[in-house]
Image: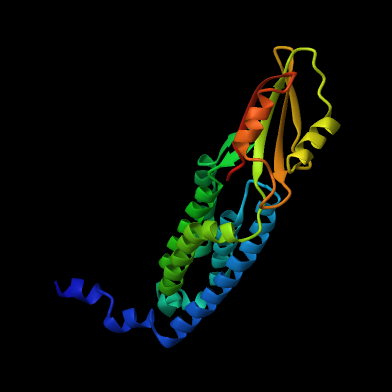
Amino acid sequence: MNKLLADLPSAELLAKFWSAPMVTSNLIVFFSLFGALLLGLLVGYERSYRGRAAGMRTYGLVCMASAALTVIAGYPHSWYGGQVAVSLGADPTRIVQGIVTGIGFLGAGVIMKEGLNISGLTTAASIWAASVIGVLVGVGFYLSAMLLALMSAVCMIGVPKLAVWLPSRLAIAIALQFKEGFAPSEEKLRAAAKKRGYEIAGGSISISMRESKLEWHFVAVAFDKNSGSPISDLARELSQVDGVTAFQLSHARN
């Protein structure tokens, strides 16, 4: 019993995890994470504005989590409450590398692609961010871990609401099947999209043939937040277009 009590961590040792130097280090890490989140949101906004699959949440989470993994490597003296020299028996950076690699495969498993739509990116990024939170807790950055968890939740919950207030452009994934022998014109297709307030995203057009019928797949992006015909109106018009035998419309999402 006495041996068991002797092996328990002392109050002094536990207090070192919340000492002034440790709190200072955690705050420095926090400001790094916050800055990375802002920069990630900036890049993600540019991508989402252009109708790309990966948006603000995805970029914000990935950038912030990457910063978290990088910045803690600069404070080895603060790992495990400053007890690295006493308790460190193996290289923890190798463990972190293994975690990142494993979580990468896990995140890839939740990403789904359907036509031009990609879903699960934010889920994959949040899973990776969760692994980084675990790493932060594991090395003793408790305050930084709590702040990262809080900012991740705010990013996933609050960013979509923020995006509603920011200038944005609606993106619609469109698949068209034409009757046999019909030769559609890309120029006319772009002109028709422009007339309805859309432009075809550069490099998004793909053409295939099924049962002797041409199929065109592309993403149409509205000129601005207030332009672009509703998807229901587009469906009604496409049902009356001569030469189109089948179509599919869906909001491009991530």
Above-or-below relation of 93 to 122? below
User: Residue 139: percent from the left, percent from the top?
Assistant: 44, 69
Above-or-below relation of 53 to 166? above
User: Residue 215: percent from the left, percent from the top?
Assistant: 72, 23
The quarter holding residue 230 reads top right
Name the image quarter holding the N terminus.
bottom left
Q: Residue at the location (57% across, 57% down)? A: 164
- Whether residue 205 is visible, yes or no, is yes
Q: Residue at the location (45% across, 75% down)? A: 84
Residue in front for this viewpoint, 73 or 241: 241
Above-or-below relation of 9 to 217? below
- Whether residue 89 is visible, yes or no, is no
Q: Residue at the location (81% across, 23% down)? A: 184
The quarter holding residue 83 reads bottom left
Instruction: Tally the marks.
Output: 0
Q: Residue at the location (53% across, 63% down)? A: 93
